[in-house]
Image: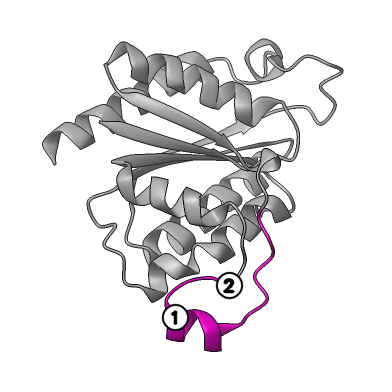
């Protein structure tokens, strides 16, 4: 089994730390997990050229999204993690979402795929709204089944501590929640 984790944070910090912890949990279960840091990828903004992508069933941009889409097709499941910006993902993750429209246009079958959606930020209600938006909009349109969701409170300023999400005392049971998510994902994949 193979999981593709997508980190939608423009900086090293909480989202990446969570994905690294989940990777450890999944590897204990014998599940391969690749983490893609969108901030290190060349992803051009979608410029709405539907005349091209609908006709050619491809994107005209020569960027890293073609490779990411192939990895998405090959993976059994996904973990999407991002910070919360005004109850939405940051622009970097939104660019990723927009460029996944090729998967929709080509009617790529993702119905067997499973996902975890995680967001971090300083306002719990806005974080939960971000998770709901990604789960119900992006994942449901691509017919990816979301089997676990996480909303974790963080601090904006990490002051160089990339592990702050686990040490700030704002999420008393984060370790157990992540273990549970990894278990849910593993069990869901075994059933299919």
In percent of width and height, residue 156 lies at 81, 31
Rendered residue at 50%/79% (across/down): 53
Rendered residue at 12%/36% (across/down): 191
Left or right of residue 123, residue 56 in this image: left
In percent of width and height, residue 164 lies at 71, 16
| Pick the front one: 17 or 118 | 17
CB-based contact (under 8 Å), mark 1 and mark 2: yes
Left or right of residue 189, residue 147 in this image: right
For label 1, the crowd category at 10 Å Cα-Cα, with few meaning under 14, some 14 to 19 and many 20 or more, is few
| SS under mark 2 | loop
Rendered residue at 31%/65% (across/down): 108
| Pick the front one: 8 or 178 | 8
Q: What numbered label is drawn on residue 56?
A: 1
Q: Quadrant of residue 97?
A: bottom right
Instruction: Report which residue position mark 2 lands on.
Output: 60
In the image, residue 12 sits, relative to residue 134, either above or below, namely above
**In this figure, which colouring scheme has been used for the structure?**
one colour
Q: CA distance from mark 1 to mark 2?
A: 9 Å
Residue bounds of the magenta highlight: 43-59
| SS under mark 1 | helix
């Amino acid at each position: 089994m193979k999981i593709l984790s997508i980190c939608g944070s423009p900086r090293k910090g909480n989202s990446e730390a969570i994905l690294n912890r989940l990777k450890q949990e999944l590897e204990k279960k014998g599940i391969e997990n690749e983490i893609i840091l969108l901030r290190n990828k060349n992803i051009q903004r979608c410029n709405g050229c539907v005349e091209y992508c609908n006709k050619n069933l491809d994107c005209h941009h020569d960027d890293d999204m073609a490779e990411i889409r192939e990895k998405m097709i090959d993976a059994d499941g996904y973990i999407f993690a991002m910070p919360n910006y005004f109850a939405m993902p940051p622009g970097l993750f939104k660019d990723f979402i927009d460029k996944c429209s090729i998967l929709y246009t080509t009617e790529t079958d993702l119905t067997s795929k499973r996902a975890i959606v995680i967001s971090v930020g300083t306002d719990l209600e806005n974080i939960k709204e971000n998770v709901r938006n990604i789960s119900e909009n992006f994942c449901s349109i691509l017919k990816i089944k979301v089997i676990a969701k996480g909303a974790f409170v963080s601090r904006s300023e990490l002051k160089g501590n990339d592990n702050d999400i686990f040490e700030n005392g704002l999420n008393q049971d984060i370790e157990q929640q992540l273990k549970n998510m990894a278990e849910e994902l593993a069990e869901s994949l075994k059933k299919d």
